[in-house]
Amino acid sequence: MELRQLEYFLAVCDEGSFTRAAQRLHVVQSAVSAAIKNLERELHTVLFVRSSKQMDLTEAGRALLPKARATIDAAVAARDVVAEVRTGLRGTVRVGTMTSVAPIDVPDVVGRFHRAYPGVTLSLRANMTGSAGLAELVVNGGLDLAILSISGGAPAGLQLRSLGSSPLLLVVRDDHRLADRADATLADVADEPFIDFPVGFGNRTIVDRAFREAGRRRRVVVEIADAGEAAAYVRAGLGVSLVPGFVRPRPDGVAVLTISDVDLTWPVQLAQPADRPPSAAASVLAQMMVDAAPPTAV
């Protein structure tokens, strides 16, 4: 078994197809297919269920996945630690983030890190499956760090460090029956159509829990992945929305209220694996992000 085979296996797992894995690895698709076939032959088992639409892991593939990640991570760490001795901080740091992030300025922190440590390769991506998807990637080794939002304590396998928080504010059209008020209750908007985030996003989880604990149902008619888009849908008359306070929209066409009867605080955290030590580069970047947070966050 070769490291290259495991790298190709992980690329197919992450990308969901041989074609996208080949593009990510900058090789031809036949090379990826051959590597996976050879790996399956060596292991005497099938790792993927192949169909025209998607690639699904078999039970053997799912068992191999965490071991393959650990093996590649160990090989990369061994190479990086030698490089650090020779030339200073090196390696690769994979960072996931929500599409809307506050209160830290992520581009600024990442830019300063890049200028200070040009020998480190940064891979930064916004995850469209929200905090739940980011947490899963950190736990299974797909990411070294993630900026996400999880309420109710850290899930198994994650270490969380606070980066701050923001209240969720109610946004309504300026001709809405609540527009002239400073605040509202969940009961006031329980029957309204909502513009919200998909299930798995941190703020959606907070709002869903609040309505559930209040014994009220609500209708989500539009799902978005970027908080900055919410006000546009509200202005269009499609519903109301609860968005983090840092995304306070322009006042034209909408009104912004607080929710007075329940705590809708959206926490922002930095997630790291709890069961494996970070690389030196990941540790430095993580500390820079924590240091960039407001004093009340740490």
Image (spheres, grey):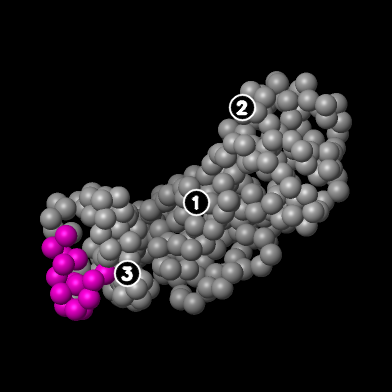
| 203 is higher (above) or lower (below) than 66 | above
The percent coordinates of residue 228 (x first, y second) are 59, 35
- Give the amino acid at mark 1: Thr
Identify the residue at image location x=16%, y=77%: 42
Say which element carries label 3.
loop
- Give the amino acid at mark 2: Ala
| The N terminus, quarter of image | bottom left
User: If you read the primary sequence from the N terminus, does the residue marked by circle 1 or circle 3 appear first?
Assistant: 3
User: If you read the primary sequence from the N terminus, does the residue marked by circle 1 or circle 2 appear first?
Assistant: 1
Q: Is residue 151 left or right of residue 226?
A: right
Magenta stretch in the rendered image: 33-47
- Give the amino acid at mark 3: Thr
| The C terminus, quarter of image | bottom right
Taken as a whole, is the magenta stretch helix, strand or loop?
helix
Q: Which residue is label 1 attached to? A: 129
The percent coordinates of residue 221 (x first, y second) are 62, 37
Q: Is residue 9 left or right of residue 219?
A: left
Q: Which residue is label 3 attached to? A: 58
